[in-house]
Every structure is written in C-alpha cells, then in structure tokens.
Amino acid sequence: MTRPLTTAPPTGVAVRSLAPDLARGFMLLAIALAHAPAFVDDWDLGPAALNTIASPPPSESPSESG
C-alpha cells in the first residue's frame, strides 16, 4: 500500500537559512561583473579570420594614392 504524498507548508522567513540566498546573490554579482566588459568595450568575437572578413576595409589616406 502506498501513502498519498503530502506537501509541507512553506518555510517561514525566520526559519530559512540565509547562507544559500547570500551565496546565490554573490554568484549573480560575480556573473554580472564578469560580463560587464562586454557591455562597455567592443569585443572581437569568434576566430580572427572571421573578424578580419567581417570588418570593413581601412580607407585609403590621400598620401597613399598617387
């Protein structure tokens, strides 16, 4: 015979452990700080050959043409 599953009521705030919430917060902060340069700077993504192909050619200066 199997017993029906019962669910426990939600844990109150006073009973919860603070450590998992703090660890989760620090990990999210670390992820945000690790990805911050991508929003501030221009990152060359992918292999160098593809970056060279995708970048526009440099414009010729007047002194080079002639």
Image (tube, helix red, strand yellow):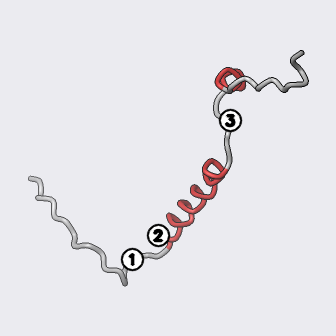
Q: In this view, which residue lies farthest toward the top?
A: 66
Between label 2 and label 1, give the one nearer the viewer: 2
- Could you give the CA–CA distance between mark 3 and mark 2, rounded to whole angstroms? 35 Å
Between label 1 and label 3, give the one nearer the viewer: 3
Going by the numbered disc 3, the residue's amino acid type is Asp
Going by the numbered disc 2, the residue's amino acid type is Asp
Q: Nearer the viewer, residue 53 or 61?
A: 61
- Could you give the CA–CA distance between mark 1 and mark 3, rounded to whole angstroms? 44 Å
Look at the numbered disc 2 and give the secondary structure of its residue.
helix
Check residue 54 in the rendering and tell me which mark sits there, or answer none.
none
Tell me where residue 40 appears, x and y as whole percent: 65, 52
Between label 3 and label 2, give the one nearer the viewer: 3
Check residue 16 in the rendering and tell me which mark sits there, or answer none.
1
For image coordinates 50% across by 72% down, the residue present is 19
Look at the numbered disc 1 and give the secondary structure of its residue.
loop
Q: Where is 17 relative to 47, above or below?
A: below
Check residue 21 in the rendering and tell me which mark sits there, or answer none.
2
- Specify the quadrant of the image occupied by residue 13: bottom left
Q: Nearer the viewer, residue 25 or 8?
A: 25
Mark 2 neighbour class, 10 Å CA radius: few under 14, some 14 to 19, many 20 or more: few
Check residue 44 in the rendering and tell me which mark sits there, or answer none.
3
Q: How many discs mark residues in the rendered view?
A: 3
For image coordinates 55% across by 60% down, the residue present is 27
Tell me where residue 55 appears, x and y as whole percent: 68, 27
Tell me where residue 66 appears, x and y as whole percent: 89, 15
Mark found first going from the N terminus, 1 or 3: 1
Asked whether disc 2 touches disc 1, contact meaning CB atoms under 8 Å apart, the reply is yes
For image coordinates 11% across by 58% down, the residue present is 4
